[in-house]
Amino acid sequence: MTIVHTVLFQFKADATPEEVKAACDHFVALKDSCVHPTLNTPYIKSLRGGKDNSPERLQNGITHGFVIEFESVEDRDYYVATGPAHQAFVKSIGDVVIKAIVVDFEDGVY
């Protein structure tokens, strides 16, 4: 069953547009840089995201959202806990992200 991993960011008020773009570009690049430790192949099935443009005004400071799909729970768990590309990304955004929200689910499992 595919695991959907959603990530929402609120960037710090003093983050420059260049810093925000660099962080987002780095995040999207995880699609190719996250490589399975034994198979040596990318393990992210899909990754997409962008800047919020909702007219509902319910963002509560969140400005950017991303959706990642993993083929399995094991792939997601490796990504979150020990994947070196993901760990490096998390360390790299500490100066520009004030809040991150993560919600994972299997489609149709309520």
Image: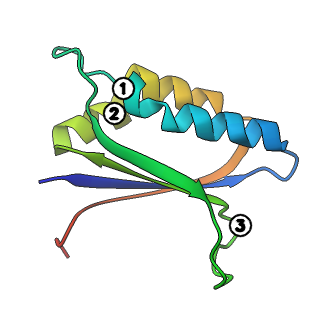
Residue type at mark 3: give it. Gly
Q: Point out which mark residue 79 bears.
A: 2
Question: Is residue 108 shown left or right of residue 65?
Answer: left
Q: Residue at x 18, y 43 (%)?
A: 71
Quadrant assignment, res 22 = top right
Q: Residue at x 50, y 38 (%)?
A: 28
> Farthest right residue?
14
Instruction: Provide the residue designation for mark 3.
Output: 61
Above or below, 105 against 32 in this view is below
* Circle 3 SS class: loop
Residue type at mark 1: give it. Cys
Of the two numbered discs 2 and 3 on the same chain, state the one appearing first in sequence: 3
Question: What is the image's colouring?
Answer: rainbow
Q: Residue 13 in the image: x percent, y percent?
A: 85, 53
Q: Residue 91 in the image: x percent, y percent?
A: 59, 28
Of the two numbered discs 2 and 1 on the same chain, state the one appearing first in sequence: 1
Residue type at mark 2: give it. Tyr
Q: Say whether marks 2 and 1 touch (CB < 8 Å).
A: yes
Which quadrant holds the N terminus? bottom left
Instruction: Provide the residue designation for mark 1.
Output: 34
- Sort mark 2 into few (<14), some (14-19) or many (20+) by Cα contacts within 10 Å: many
